[in-house]
């Protein structure tokens, strides 16, 4: 079945967005690691893993949260409630962005950073070069285990506290919009219509 024009636009947007994020994140981390000590490189690696886990939690929470309670908060002008409703109405995109785009980019970056750390370790301790394959396998397994374990723990939190998590994310976006003066979650189209369909359950 041929993809609709709208689907092609969405796929193209996801490709361009993921490519841009991967380039910026990869370039930034590479420059930081080249100019930093081995300990800073480890900190950056754990930060990337942490970011991957946090965004995975948000992506799952977006699909598990219920929209209706946040409408009441928005009616009472609770900060971030309007932004939360927008996120929930676009839960498919939020999940795709958080779980797939950020998750995959972070996974690729963490693997590359682990390899870079190994190179620096071998430079500092040449004797490690004799077991390069072993150490490379160990570091990649460590990164994978930390990421998988963190996401496994985060899934329960995301499902059980979905509404609270999305409220906090909405409040954060509202704060960013306030500081920048730009709305990232304007739900109105021309003619006063709103994006997405409301999830009433």
Image: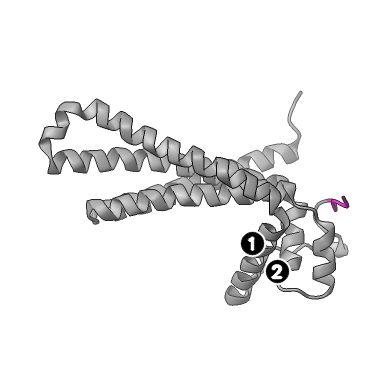
Label drawn at residue 18: none
State the residue at coordinates (56%, 44%).
153
> Which residue shows up at 62% across the image and 41% down it?
12
Q: Position of residue 20 (x, y in %)?
A: 49, 48
Query: In which quadrant will I find the N terminus?
Result: top right
Q: Residue at x 70, y 50 (%)?
A: 160
**Within-10-Å neighbours for mark 2: few <14, some 14–19, many 20+:** many
Q: Position of residue 177 (x, y in %)?
A: 63, 71
Q: Is residue 128 above or below residue 155?
A: above
Kindly state the secondary structure of the residue where label 2 is placed. Answer: loop
Residue at position x 64%, y 45% from top? Answer: 156
Give the quarter of the image for residue 185.
bottom right
Q: How is the image coloured?
A: one colour
Magenta-highlighted stretch: main secondary structure?
Answer: loop
Q: Quadrant of residue 136?
A: top left
Most extreme residue toward the left is 126
The residue identified by callout 1 is: 169
Where in the figure is residue 112, as x and y percent of width and height? 35, 39
Visible residue check, residue 25: yes
Whether tag 2 and tag 1 are in contact, CB under 8 A, the answer is yes
Q: Position of residue 78 (x, y in %)?
A: 75, 74
Count residues near mark 1 (Cα–Cα under 10 Å), then give few for <14, some for 14-19, many for 20+.
some
Query: Quick one: 8 or 186, which is closer to the camera?
Result: 186
Q: Secondary structure at mark 1?
A: helix
Q: Which residue is mark 2?
A: 80
Q: Which of disc 1 and disc 2 is earlier in sequence?
A: 2
Residue 199 on the magenta segment: yes
**Mark 2 to mark 1: distance in Å?**
8 Å
Q: Is residue 176 left or right of residue 10?
A: left
Q: Is residue 23 left or right of residue 139?
A: right
Quarter-wise, where is residue 183 in the image? Answer: bottom right
Q: Which residues are magenta?
A: 197-201
């Amino acid at each position: 079945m041929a993809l609709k024009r709208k689907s092609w636009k969405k796929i193209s947007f996801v490709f361009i967005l993921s490519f841009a994020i991967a380039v910026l994140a990869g370039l930034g981390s590479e420059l930081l690691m080249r100019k930093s000590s081995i300990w800073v490189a480890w900190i950056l690696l754990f930060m990337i893993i942490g970011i991957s886990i946090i965004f995975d939690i948000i992506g799952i929470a977006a699909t598990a949260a219920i929209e209706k309670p946040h409408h009441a908060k928005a009616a009472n002008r609770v900060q971030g409630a309007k932004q939360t409703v927008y996120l929930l109405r676009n839960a498919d995109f939020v999940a795709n962005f958080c779980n797939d785009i950020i998750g995959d980019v972070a996974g690729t970056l963490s693997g590359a950073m682990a390899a870079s750390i190994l190179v620096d370790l071998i430079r500092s301790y040449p004797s490690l070069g004799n077991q390069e394959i072993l150490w490379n396998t160990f570091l990649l397994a460590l990164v994978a285990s930390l990421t998988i374990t963190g996401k496994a723990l985060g899934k329960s939190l995301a499902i059980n506290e979905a509404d609270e998590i999305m409220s906090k994310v909405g409040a954060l976006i509202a704060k960013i919009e306030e500081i920048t003066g730009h709305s990232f979650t304007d739900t109105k189209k021309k003619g006063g219509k709103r994006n997405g369909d409301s999830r009433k359950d």
